[in-house]
Amino acid sequence: MNLLEVERLSIRYGNELVVDELSFAVGKGESVGLVGESGSGKSQTALAILGLTPREAVVSGSIRFSGADLRRLSEVQLNGLRARHIGIVFQDPSQALNPYLRVGRQLREIVVRHGLGSGTEADERVVEMLAKVGLPDPGRQFTAYPHELSGGMRQRVMLASALIAQPELLIADEPTTALDVTVQAQILELLEEIRDNTALLLITHDLGIVAGRCERMLVLGSGRLVDSGATTALFAAPGHPHTSALLATAPRIDKGEAPESVTGKLVFGVEAATVNYEAQGRKALQAVTDISLSLRAGETLAVVGESGSGKSSLVRAMLGLVPMAGGKVVYAGETLGARVEQRARAQRRDLQLVFQDPIAALDPQMRVHALVGEGLLVHEPQLTAAERLERVSETLGRVGLDAEYLDRFPHELSGGQAQRVAIARALVLRPRVLVCDEAVAALDGSVREQVLALLRQVQDETGLSIIFISHDLAVVQSVSHRVLVMYLGRLFELADNRALFSAPRHPYTRALIDAVPVPDPLVPPRTAPLRGEVPSPLDPPSGCVFHPRCPYATHICAREVPATRDIDGTRVACHRAEELDL
Amino acid sequence: MSLFSNRTVRVSGGIIFAIATVALLGPWLSPNDYLSTNFDRLLSPPTLDGARFFGTDDLGRDLFVRTMLGIRVTLVVAIVASLVSLVIGVAYGAVAGFVGGRIDAAMMRAVDTLYALPFIFFVILLMVAFERNFLLIFIAIGAVNWLDMARIVRGQTLSLREREFVEAARVMGVSPARIVFRHIAPNLLGIVVVYVTLTIPQAILVESFLSFLGLGVQEPQTSLGTLVDAGVSQMEGSTWTLLIPGGLLALILMSFNFLGDGLRDVFDARQET
């Protein structure tokens, strides 16, 4: 008998059918991946299994767990089942832990509630579990509050709370999406290690994760199960066009094709940029330390690094949105004003920005035509309203939106459509440089590919230079000509795409590349390349700031800051760059 | 838009509208006026005879017409006072929030200082020091109520200023003035509308309180507060002289409070989408 049997599960919100007659089963100890794009009903399915769908959801069908029909159980009976027999890990560990309770108490509650121990016995069990999920000094962490832990540590605590009662089934809903790629690798590895005989239902949009960690996979498309089978079989021969499309849009870092490097003239750059954030009465936080770079016409320069690496601060300083403590920004041979307001109108026009969250970047009170047309009001005030509208329509057409979108408000657009509007708003000014700050991070694979293709096309046609900030190295590899790797605000490596991915010079670059899961079940997942997490930029380590995590660190690394130097056209800051073969 | 799909907004807005309409048209349609005394009908209870729906007061004046006039005065005082606080509060708060830094700190410390002022004493002093007049009541109430508004608007502006769509506008080359008027102000609208609706009942209460103390609107002019004050002295025997203006005052206050709550729900829902 299967552990979990879902039969003809449908979930409806008003007139909207989010899950449509979904049937699948999970066997004892099996690992099953549930994949699909956003809005495909993955998370709703997980909530329905746990009996946690909101009141307005209309659920039908049957969900059998160990033979019992969960949909017929009372809330009290379900409460006895959750955490005890079905564990759950959510995407955002900072939301899932109660900020007012010590970590140990939250775990202890589960142990005591389900009668698995009491008194010191329960405490011991919790400490043991915390040790098992790799928390350093678990005895002390027992009394820590969630905010004292880093994101990765919190997710380890969540994993501990999900597995402490040794449930038969673990549901993990995008468990690593909110984490950096090196931490993701650690968490996935840990999950594998401590799962024992617990069956796993892993919900994710990342085919790389499923390929490496799941025996079987289920593919959802608009609430329907479109494909299912053994992971290796489905990757080799998808049973449904939707699966093929998903696979086609999943970038592979091990087989990516790097674009040819470009040799245009230098257009935009920054010299010795330093950015500080000062909080009253506290130590200044150095977000960017002495970074120089320059961008060629028609070139895409990617900036990569984990959260807190200073990627966004660097480009915001270049655009004049945050003040620089040192250094200067150069555009077309001229030094630009430090603040965007001090720059000449023509210079401002040439440098445009696209954000990660398109909905937040569009004024909610304005319609699409006004949003896109606003820049024209400033830079081409001589245009009549009709001419302006024509330019707006034309630009919207280029990003693949027709006239029907002109009068919409941002909240009436999907994420992909809103991002196109944001791109159209930048392109309507015919800029020379476009800064994309994680501009495709929030988009589904197919939409991401469309947006990237659009940017590439504009670049080919107009010689646009692009600064492409991303945490996703697989995407970076497919779009960029050169790559800047940052860590704690410092330049670690700046190299041509091909050189960087085939022969990285810095151990951190190597680790970032190795941590990216490869969407191919035949490529076994690498062991997590780095331990620990990015230290606080308020208190950076001595010497080379990477030395506490670096597998190649020696004595000198802890003492001396490595000089940034050129080796075969690559700029690199590592004491051992010449001798290491990564 | 969904402004009228919210039932609380519809019902409370409807009540306010109905009361305001009757207050506006009632005295004009009524055969009686607010000044004429009638010593044959001192303190007569409400009756349909002669359209004396609310009866008469101790001087035989028609209470229906007087109450309607009182509502007019109360509403006008409250709305004008709220507008005063709206204009001062929004301008002050938006400037402090948008400019930021030291200017913001200085402006907000000034607000903190004014908060420390014992408001009621301040108003009473004003009333005693200057000739009592309508204008003074507006200014006194508005000048104190703007403090809350300034704080709220400043907080909102501070958070809006950091929003990505404002950054996007800065990069595009949009002027600071246009950013304030085109991007920040429209996004402040929701919270300001809600807050004004909640300031109106506060202003009504203050006005009634001052009038009740005899510091507000003076005879033969009247307001709900003045009428309640007069009703209190007659409440033994002629309960309607207290209950009718008092009840209407309560109804108006409640309607504005519910309207504010309803509007908040409407605007919150828009924020979420």
Image (cartoon, coloured by chain):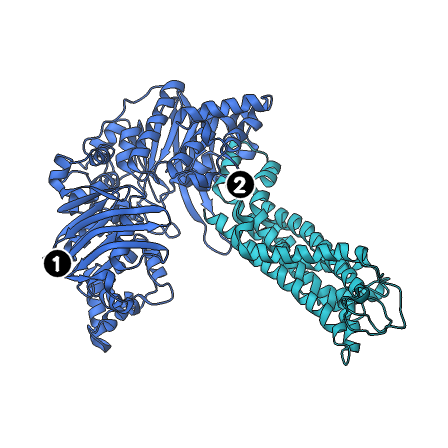
Chain in blue colour: A
Q: Nearer the viewer, residue A416 or A560?
A: A416
Can you identify the residue that label 1 sits on? A196
Q: Is residue A369 above or below residue B200?
A: above
Q: Are marks 1 and 2 on the same chain?
A: yes
Q: Is residue A189 above or below residue A316?
A: below
Q: Which residue is found at the position 24% from the left and 29% from the top?
A: A499
Q: Nearer the viewer, residue B97 or A236?
A: A236
Measuring from the top left, give residue B227's x and y in whole percent: 78, 68
Q: Quadrant of residue A249?
A: top left
Mark 1 or 2 closer to N-term?
A: 1
> In terms of secondary structure, where does tag 2 sit?
loop
Packing grade of label 2 (10 A; few <14, some 14-19, many >=20) is some
Circle on res. A477: none
Packing grade of label 1 (10 A; few <14, some 14-19, many >=20) is few
Measuring from the top left, give residue B28's x and y in whole percent: 81, 55
Left or right of A10 on screen, residue B16: right
